[in-house]
Image (cartoon, rainbow, N blue to C red):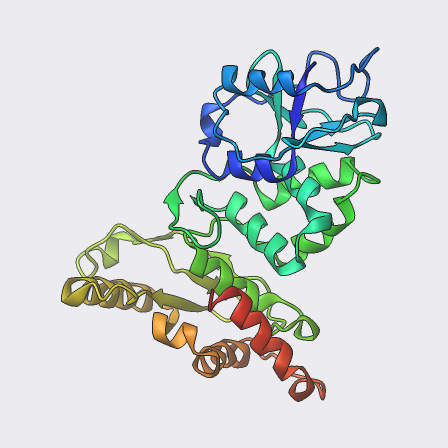
Amino acid sequence: MTLYLADAPAVEYWRRADPSAKTRARAATPFGQDRETPPFSASDLAALEEAGVGWLSEPIHLLAPDASSRRRCKRTKLHVCSHRLPERSFVKLSSRVMVASPVLTCLSIAPSTPFPLLVEFLYELCGRYRLPDGRGGDAVELPPATTVAGIERFADKARGVRGAADVKRALRYACDNSLSPMETDIAETMVFDPRMGGLGLEKPQLNPRFEVTRKNRRALPQSAYLPDLFWPRANISVEYDSDKHHRGDRKASEDAIRRNGIEHLGTRVVTLTWGQARNYYEFERVALLVASALGKKFGPGWDAWANRRIELHRLLVQR
């Protein structure tokens, strides 16, 4: 029997695996088109060790094309998906083990994941970091597993599949190229609809590359600068300076040089420190500077939604 890993094990896998090291492949027989699907047996889990993923946490969530595969087993949880899934829905780990692709993983967790955390996971997969130990752990650098556009194309093809509509909605707030969990949470909090606890700002570009022209090379020490969050329409950026670990004068000097470089290239810079980010009222003051630059007007419901903003900030930024 072929094991199709989905949900929590797929999240765990993609938080640890380098996406560039695996070749995406369809199952030999397209999912849901098997002539015969034998009942799952606990002995089938030996295939996980053979595929090099015996470290996945239990229970192992598996996708099955019909209920005939169900069998009581404390080590597994089976989910039935009767839809024919789009091509490239799985990555082949071995002859007997497939893992949901990054985009299918998003769909599989969407129905059971709080919406802000679903959006947060989209940022992570589309960004250049992963959280191998979950939201409370340290980030490691990895290339993007997918893109916002790639997830959208897949969700369109998977229309009717459970989770597709949730993911399509979440994509309204997701951005590519985040370099850290804090960049993700700052951006998400700023772009969420005010009714959901956000500020309703347009989506920024995350870490776009500002090339230094020849005439500026003498004044600037770097060949390019990457502002953390950049809104091109207002030509304003938010630079997050993490002083969480008190890295001293050298870090402060590097941050100042970086800010000066971006400003020299003609972009207004607003600085947000770790301490400011953690304090909701200080965070909101910085966010309102960006809102003002964008000409954002807040309606009469702004004050009524204050508690929602505090709750969202606590969930994301204060974690």
- Which residue is rendered at x = 60% and y = 56% of the image? 117
Does 179 appear above or below 254?
above
Can residue 100 be seen? yes
Can residue 273 be seen? no
Q: Observer-nearest residue: 113 or 179?
A: 113
Q: How many marks?
A: 0
Does 292 appear above or below 215?
below
- Which residue is rendered at x = 46% and y = 32% of the image? 17
- Which residue is rendered at x = 50% and y = 23% of the image? 22
- Where in the figure is residue 23, as x and y percent of width and height? 53, 20
Does 178 appear above or below 84?
below
- Where in the figure is residue 224, as x and y percent of width and height? 30, 52
Q: Observer-nearest residue: 233 or 87?
A: 87
Q: Observer-nearest residue: 288 or 249?
A: 249
In the shown orientation, is residue 155 left or right of residue 201? Answer: right
- Which residue is rendered at x = 82% and y = 17% of the image? 33
Q: What is the quadrant of residue 229 in the picture?
A: bottom left
In the shown orientation, is residue 268 left or right of residue 57? Answer: left
Q: Going by the picture, which residue comes out furthest to the left?
A: 249
Quarter of the rendering occupied by the N terminus: top right
In the shown orientation, is residue 176 left or right of residue 246? Answer: right
- Where in the figure is residue 208, as x and y percent of width and height? 43, 53
- Where in the figure is residue 312, as x and y percent of width and height? 58, 70
Q: Observer-nearest residue: 33 or 25?
A: 33
Does 92 appear above or below 167?
above
